[in-house]
Image: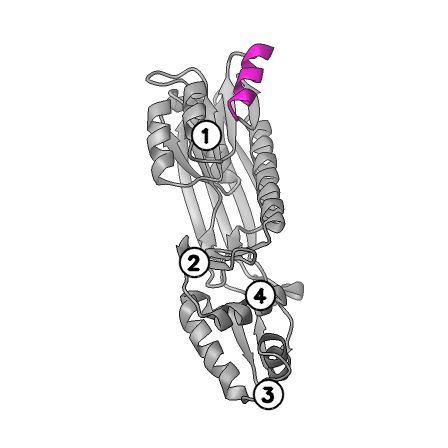
């Protein structure tokens, strides 16, 4: 690789029959022909397994080259977060190992009560919930979490009767996996549920005429702009200018075009009025002021790359 790589994670796990597992993830920004580029980093996952059986030591190496995690504009990694809820440490350890190998960040809870407390304080992309647990069972925890969160939930249970599955779905779970389960299949279900959930959220935002980018949210119908959940106050003309630029995301907008569309053809001011509003708009947007790009000699463009 021509570009420098970054060692992201190295973890050793001890378990029965396996001496150790090294899970190494390397990142590199490589373009076509091996040249560095500004596209999303490439993720190389190397899984090295040393196992023993009948006085023999076996070395297994598994390499997977995939797209890296999502990165924001500043290169900060944004991993999907999973909460694993199970009273059996062995089950939590297995799920954690496979989930981290897939690139997920994992949090654990030992029962339903602890899961509820964690969910009140933190946000997750998905919850894997065991049904039979002390303190509070998974069904009850699912019912309680559904009162304040829409986080997708996959139920785990040794009870595979149709009644139990139907009961889980009625409480709001998104999938139901019967123990014993295949960790690989579980990860496929996890990815499928998260993808489906994100797609539904995008459709809901589209119906509501809402634009979102990282922590920035623009509700065109309600004329509300929020950053990390906090409403941003703007003047009416700032709203109009910002909404027009967002709706024309990625397009080069000349000063003349912006003035005619936002102020009208009968505007008798000069271009400095537009520049002043752009300056105020950038101040209101804080860290997201980077999205408004100046095109020298032309005008401005709103972009989220």
Is label 1 in a helix, a strand or a loop? loop
Which residue has dot 4 on it? 246
Category of crowding for the residue at label 2, using alpha-carbon neighbours closer than 10 angstroms: few (below 14), some (14–19), many (at least 20): some
Which residue has dot 1 on it? 146
Q: Nearer the viewer, mark 3 or mark 4?
A: 4
Answer with the quarter of the image where residue 255 lies.
Answer: bottom right
Does residue 167 show up magenta in the picture? yes
Which residue has dot 3 on it? 297
What residue sits 40% from the left and 67% below the top?
286
> Is 182 in front, or is 85?
85
Going from the N terminus, do you reach mark 3 or mark 4 first?
4
Left or right: 93 as drawn, with respect to 42: left
What residue sits 54% from the left and 89% below the top?
270
Asked if 135 appears above or below 204 in the picture, the reply is above
CA gap between label 1 and label 3 equals 53 Å
Going from the N terminus, do you reach mark 2 or mark 1 first?
1
- Give the percent coordinates (x, y) of residue 181: 55, 20
Going from the N terminus, do you reach mark 3 or mark 2 first?
2
CA gap between label 1 and label 4 equals 33 Å
Q: Residue furthest right?
A: 33
Going from the N terminus, do you reach mark 1 or mark 4 first?
1
What residue sits 60% from the left and 33% below the top?
188
- Give the percent coordinates (x, y) of residue 12: 40, 37
Main SS category, magenta section = helix
Is label 4 in a helix, a strand or a loop? helix
Left or right: 164 as drawn, with respect to 139: right
């Amino acid at each position: 690789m021509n570009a420098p790589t970054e060692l992201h994670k190295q973890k050793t796990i001890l378990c029965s029959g396996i001496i150790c597992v090294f899970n190494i993830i390397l990142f590199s920004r490589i373009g076509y022909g091996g040249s560095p580029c500004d596209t999303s980093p490439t993720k190389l996952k190397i899984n090295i397994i040393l196992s023993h059986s009948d006085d023999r030591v076996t070395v297994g190496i598994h390499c997977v080259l995939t797209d890296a995690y999502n990165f924001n504009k500043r290169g900060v990694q944004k991993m999907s977060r999973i909460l694993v809820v199970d009273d059996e440490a062995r089950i939590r350890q297995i799920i954690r190992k496979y989930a981290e190998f897939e690139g997920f960040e994992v949090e654990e809870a030992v029962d339903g009560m602890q899961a509820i407390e964690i969910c009140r304080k933190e946000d997750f992309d998905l919850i894997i919930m065991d049904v039979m647990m002390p303190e509070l069972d998974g069904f009850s925890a699912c019912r309680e979490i559904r009162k304040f969160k829409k986080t997708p939930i996959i139920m785990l249970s040794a009870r595979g009767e149709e009644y139990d599955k139907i009961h889980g779905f009625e409480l709001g779970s998104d999938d139901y996996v019967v123990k014993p389960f295949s960790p690989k299949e579980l990860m496929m279900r996890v990815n499928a549920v998260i993808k489906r959930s994100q797609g539904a959220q995008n459709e809901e935002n589209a119906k509501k005429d809402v634009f979102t980018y990282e922590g920035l949210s623009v509700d065109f119908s309600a004329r509300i702009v929020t950053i990390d959940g906090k409403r941003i106050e703007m003047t009416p003309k700032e709203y109009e200018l910002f909404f027009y630029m967002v709706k024309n995301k990625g397009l080069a907008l000349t000063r003349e075009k912006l003035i005619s569309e936002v102020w009208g053809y009968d505007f008798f001011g000069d271009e400095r009025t537009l520049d002043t509003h752009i300056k105020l708009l950038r101040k209101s947007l804080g860290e997201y002021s980077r999205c408004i790009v100046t095109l020298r000699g032309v005008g401005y463009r709103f972009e989220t790359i």
